[in-house]
Image (tube, grey):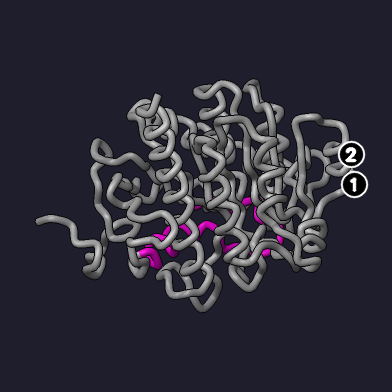
């Protein structure tokens, strides 16, 4: 039976009601339910399941990017091994976090770091399979530690890759609370990896440590649009498209899109682990995606992290955070597929 995009999603179906086999999908999505290093509010490990459930209410004709579902979106099963690693690591991490971080020689940090390394290897191996199949790899977290394996694998595959990073935080700590693979360290770890990242453009940043500020001033690969600077342009009534284009022009042709939902205004994802006042509203976020498509840069991989369904939403996708997260994910995928269509059109024109 042909898929009807206007019909209700079948019970038990994957993202957006689709059950596309991997060989028929241009997009592969990997749920990664891991949040052991979350330092303020837990819950991002429930994010993948909640986003998948909420995605069954997403209408598949998109006013901005058309019908990305037609290119095929395959969702991997929720990985039971990651759930187990998260359970073990969270049990070890909880007393460390409760005490304000690790003391020297705390062996519990080694347990958490070992779990983080397993997640990294798991995500990297899956990303390699997706790329070998010619698919766009999409990581659905989980906390923001989980895309390390995807980012580094994409960087090895695509020479001269850059990162467009939406986040309230700089994520440049060498570790946090004693955990090497912390959600607060994703960019530090990626930039320390033996791969080439030519540029990181971070937008929405409004919380950072003194050491991170120093790193931003010293590392020529790093550029940041701080949230207060965005707010000044917004309040002055200036054309925000010009500012977006200025920062997108800093990126190379191939881009990995990393999106922590705390980069949004907290009214959109209020239960995310480390919310901060400020951030992008929905239409501003869509403007970034539209301008990214217009720039003709190629999205080679992406992640969406830190969606936490909250106590009233749980994993059934009925909370506001999962509703927003599912629609944001569809728009991100839509932007990537629209870019591919533009690039194919340009290639044919030559």
Query: Residue 39: where, in percent of width, then height?
Result: 70, 57
**Residue shown at 47% from the left, 35% from the top:** 122
CB within 8 Å, label 1 to label 2: yes
Q: Secondary structure at mark 1?
A: helix
Which of the 4 quarters of the picture holds residue 270?
bottom right
Magenta span: 32-55
In-image side of 243 versus 312 (left or right): right
User: Could you tell me if residue 321 is visible in this image?
Assistant: yes
Depicted 27 relative to depicted 260: above or below: above
The label shown at residue 286 is: none
User: Could you tell me if residue 99 is visible in this image?
Assistant: no
Near mark 2 (Cα within 10 A), the count class, few <14, some 14-19 or many ≥20, is few
In-image side of 196 versus 76 (left or right): right
Q: Is 44 in the magenta?
A: yes
Query: Residue 105: where, in percent of width, then height?
Result: 79, 39
State the residue in front, 135 or 286.
286
**Residue shown at 52% from the left, 28% from the top:** 153
Which of the 4 quarters of the picture holds residue 91?
bottom right
Query: Residue 58: where, in percent of width, then height?
Result: 37, 66
Q: Is 51 in the magenta?
A: yes
The label shown at residue 210 is: 1
Question: Residue farthest to the left?
Answer: 1
**Residue underneath mark 2:** 214
Near mark 1 (Cα within 10 A), the count class, few <14, some 14-19 or many ≥20, is few
**Residue shown at 48% from the left, 51% from the top:** 332
State which quarter of the image contains the C terminus: top left
In-image side of 280 versus 316 (left or right): right
Disc 1 to disc 2, how far (Cα)? 6 Å
């Amino acid at each position: 039976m042909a898929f009807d995009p206007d019909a209700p999603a079948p019970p038990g179906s994957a993202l957006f009601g689709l059950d596309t086999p991997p060989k028929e999908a241009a997009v592969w999505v990997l749920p990664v339910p891991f949040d052991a290093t979350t330092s303020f509010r837990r819950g991002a490990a429930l994010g993948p399941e909640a986003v998948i459930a909420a995605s069954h209410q997403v209408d598949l004709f998109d006013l901005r990017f058309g019908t990305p579902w037609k290119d095929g979106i395959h969702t991997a099963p929720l990985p039971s091994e990651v759930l187990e690693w998260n359970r073990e690591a969270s049990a070890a991490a909880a007393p460390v976090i409760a005490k304000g971080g690790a003391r020297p020689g705390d062996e519990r940090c080694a347990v958490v770091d070992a779990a983080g390394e397993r997640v990294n290897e798991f995500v990297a191996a899956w990303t390699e399979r997706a790329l070998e199949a010619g698919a766009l790899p999409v990581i659905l977290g989980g906390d923001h530690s989980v895309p390390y394996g995807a980012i580094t694998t994409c960087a090895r595959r695509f020479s001269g890759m850059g990162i467009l990073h939406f986040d309230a935080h700089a994520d440049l700590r060498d570790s946090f609370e004693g955990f090497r693979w912390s959600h607060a360290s994703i960019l530090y770890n990626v930039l320390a990896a033996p791969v080439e990242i030519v540029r990181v453009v971070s937008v929405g940043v409004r919380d950072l440590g003194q050491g991170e500020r120093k790193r931003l001033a010293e590392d020529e690969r790093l550029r940041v649009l701080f949230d207060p600077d965005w707010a000044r342009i917004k309040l002055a009534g200036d054309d925000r498209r010009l500012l977006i284009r200025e920062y997108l022009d800093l990126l190379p042709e191939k881009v990995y899109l990393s999106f922590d939902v705390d980069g949004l205004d907290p009214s959109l994802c209020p239960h995310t682990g480390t919310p901060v006042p400020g951030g992008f509203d929905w239409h501003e976020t869509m403007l970034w995606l539209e301008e990214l498509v217009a720039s003709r840069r190629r999205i080679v991989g992406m992640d969406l992290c830190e969606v936490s369904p909250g106590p009233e939403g749980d994993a059934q996708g009925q909370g506001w955070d999962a509703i927003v997260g599912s629609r944001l994910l569809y728009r991100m995928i839509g932007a990537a597929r629209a870019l591919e269509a533009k690039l194919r059109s340009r290639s044919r024109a030559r």
